[in-house]
């Protein structure tokens, strides 16, 4: 699957809906809404409401903490940054958000989330002890941890805007070690990146930055097609 990540801080709610509409037409399978900084309850609700009006795709909240919760989304990634050095990113924000999520009756998708170098903004604000790009055993160890904890998904993140995606060899080793669905994102800007990652075993490929540039359609089309064909 291909998922399009939309950061509600980067444009108006109508702008977010327009991106979702275009991405939907090009075949993206779901929309994720979130960002590492600048997400407020107001811009989040605005974006989710407009996106829901514009497309029939699943809209999943990709949170950075408990300060805002997308009450009108279809599901929430209940994600733990397993390699954060700050406990609030591992279970702390969760303990504050969980009662609200339960009250709202939202569906949760539990996810082990790890940050691979260079990590970019999310590595910084998440205080991640980055997995070095050649440290495949550490990535495999975290994937097994997520699986043994019973999590639904495992996400290998290079960071939004990373110059290169997570190495395909790392994805392959993780794929060979666990059966859970594998999400890969950060720095995927070319169809070749997407097909190499899917061939290595990624189940879900996420792109975000790409759609922040006005004329993204032809690039996105190539990436979505590469994901579906690989
Ligand atoms: C960020 O993995 C996503 O969480 C998307 O990264 O913005 O580099 O596509 P990009």
Image (cartoon, helix red, strand yellow):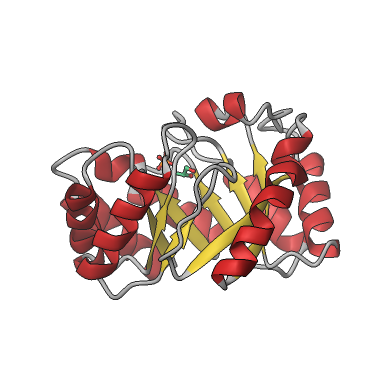
Tell me the quadrant of ligand 1.
top left
> What x and y, as percent, mark residue 11?
23, 40
Q: Where is 125 relative to 25, above or below?
A: above
The quadrant of the picture occupied by the C terminus is bottom left
Left or right of 14 in this view: 80 = right
Q: Nearer the viewer, residue 2 or 6?
A: 6
Query: Horizontally, is 202 left or right of 213 in the view?
Result: right
The one nearer the camera, 108 or 101, is: 101
Q: Is residue 106 visible?
A: no
Residue 209 location, x and y as percent? Answer: 34, 39
User: Residue at coordinates 55% horizontally, 37% vertically from top-left?
Assistant: 158
In the rendered view, would you say 75 is above or below 124? below
Q: Residue at x 54, y 62 (%)?
A: 76
> Residue 117 sits in which quadrant?
top right
Q: Considering depth in this image, is 104 or 216 the residue closer to the camera?
A: 104
The residue sitting at the left extreme is: 215
Q: Quadrant of the N terminus?
A: bottom left
Residue found 74% across the figure and 28% down from its top: 129
For image coordinates 23% across by 50% down, the residue present is: 13
Q: Is residue 131 left or right of residue 229?
A: right
Position of residue 19 in the picture relative to residue 186 (left or right): left
Q: Residue 228: x, y in percent?
A: 38, 69
């Amino acid at each position: 699957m291909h998922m399009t990540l939309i950061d509600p801080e980067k444009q108006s709610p109508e702008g977010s809906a327009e991106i979702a509409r275009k991405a939907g037409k090009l075949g993206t399978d779901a929309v994720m809404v979130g960002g590492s900084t600048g997400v407020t309850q107001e811009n989040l609700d605005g974006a989710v409401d407009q996106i829901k009006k514009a497309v029939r795709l699943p809209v999943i909240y990709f949170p950075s903490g408990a300060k805002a919760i997308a009450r009108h989304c279809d599901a929430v990634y209940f994600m733990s940054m397993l390699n954060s050095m700050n406990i609030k990113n591992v279970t702390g924000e969760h303990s504050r958000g969980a009662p609200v999520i339960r009250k709202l009756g939202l569906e949760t998708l539990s996810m082990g989330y790890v940050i691979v170098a260079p990590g970019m903004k999310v590595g910084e604000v998440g205080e991640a002890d980055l997995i070095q790009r050649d440290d495949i055993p550490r990535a495999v160890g975290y994937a097994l941890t997520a699986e043994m904890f019973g999590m639904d998904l495992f996400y290998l993140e290079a960071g939004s805007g990373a110059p290169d995606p997570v190495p395909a060899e790392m994805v392959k080793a993780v794929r060979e070690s666990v059966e859970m669905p594998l999400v890969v994102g950060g720095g995927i800007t070319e169809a070749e990146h997407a097909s190499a990652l899917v061939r290595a075993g990624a189940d879900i490929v996420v792109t975000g930055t790409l759609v922040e540039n006005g004329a993204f359609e032809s690039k996105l089309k190539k990436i979505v097609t590469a994901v579906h064909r690989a």
